[in-house]
Amino acid sequence: MARYKGAGGRNVTSLNVLPGFVQYRQDEQESVQKRTFTKWINTHLAKRNPPMVVNDLFEDIKDGVMLIALLEVLSGQKLPCEQGRQLKRIHWVANIGTALKFLEGRRIKLVNINSTDIADGRPSIVLGLVWTIILYFQIEELTSNLPQLQSLSSSASSVESVVSSETASPPSKRKVVTKVQGSARKALLKWIQYTAAKQVGIEIKDFGQSWRSGVAFHSVIHAIRPDLVDMEKVRGRSNKENLEEAFTLAEAELGIPRLLDPEDVDVDKPDEKSVMTYVAQFLKYYPDRHHTVTDVQENDCIGFALEWLYSVMPSDHDSLPNPDHLLSS
C-alpha cells in the first residue's frame, strides 16, 4: 500500500486517495452527461412552438413543464400540464407524475425514479430519467432506420432505467436493465462496425476509448459522405484536431447537432452514454438504411443476429446453430 505525507505531515495512503478519485470520476462523468443531455434536449425543444431552452438541467426540470414539453415534441402527443409563474411544489410533482405515467404507458419501466426526486433536482435521478428517454427514442429510431435490425431491437421495446443512487435496485432488476440497455448498445455498435469501421479498416470495440482519437467519428461521416473525409489525413492528426473537425463537419454538412466537444471525448475514459447519444443521430443520415443489403451485409446481419441471441438466451445455447457453420453453408 502506497504511503506519502499529505498536508500537515499527515500520513496518506492509497486507500485514502481512492474514494476521492472515484468521486472525481463520477463528478466528471456527471458533468459531461449533463452538458450532452442538455444539448440533446435543446435540439428537440427548438422544434417546439414557441421554442424552449434549458439552461440548467437540474433546475429547469424541477417543475415538470420542460419535461412534458420534451415528451410532447418527441411523441407528437399533447399532455396535460400545470403552468404559470406561481406554481407550487404540488404542481411540480403533478407535472412530473404526468410525464412518468406517460412513459410507463409506453412500457418504459422506471426503476428508482420518482416525482419527488425529480422535483428536488437530484442529479443522478435526473440524468437517469433523461438517459431512459434518450435510450427509448433512439431505439425506436434505430429499429425504424435499420429494417434488418427490427427483429433484434423489438425485444427492447420495454425499456428499464437504473440510477446509481443510494437506493439501488435489487439484483434481479439490474440484470433486466443491463440486458435491455446492452441490446441497444450492441445494435448501435454493430451498425457502426459493419457500415463504417470495417470499410476504412479500423476497429471500434466500444463507445468509450475507441472514440478518443476522433478517427471513429470520421469513419461514420465517411460512410455517409465519403467525399467529406480523407482518412489518410485523419490518421495523421491529433485527437483534438480530429474531434473538432468531425463535430464541425457533421454539423455543417450533415445537419447533426453538436452534442459533444473535444474535451468531452479526449479523456482517459470517455462517457459511453454521451458518445452513444451523439453517434445515434447519424442513423437517420445513413444513405442505404432502407435498401436491400448485399450478400456480405446479409451474412453480417445473420452473424450479428446469432451473436445477439447468444447474448440474451438465459443459459442453454445448444439449440442455437454455430454462426460460422451457418455463414459458410
Image (tube, grey):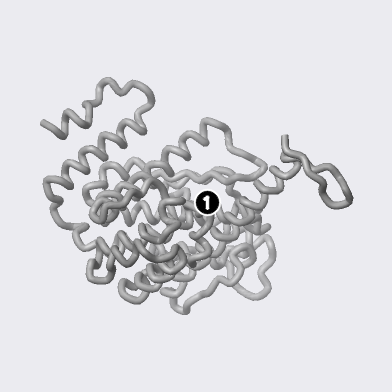
Q: Quarter-wise, where is residue 220 in the image?
A: bottom left
Residue nearest the viewer, comparing 150 with 205 = 205
**Percent position of residue 230, x then y:** 27, 67
Whether residue 53 is situated above or below residue 182 in the rendered picture:
below
Residue located beneath label 1 in the image: 269
Report the quarter where the C terminus lies: top left
Whether residue 48 is situated above or below residue 5 in the rendered picture:
below
**Percent position of residue 300, x then y:** 21, 43
Q: Residue, x 45% and y 75% (percent of image)? A: 46
Residue nearest the viewer, comparing 276 with 72 = 276
Q: Amino acid at mark 1?
A: Lys
Q: Residue, x 36% and y 64% (percent of image)? A: 236
Q: Residues within 10 Å of mark 1 (few under 14, many from 20)?
A: some
Residue nearest the viewer, comparing 201 with 99 = 201
Q: Residue, x 18% and y 57% (percent of image)? A: 290
Whether residue 74 is situated above or below residue 300 in the rendered picture:
below
**Percent position of residue 153, x then y:** 32, 45
The answer to whether 20 appears left or right of 79 in the picture is right
The answer to whether 278 appears left or right of 329 in the picture is right
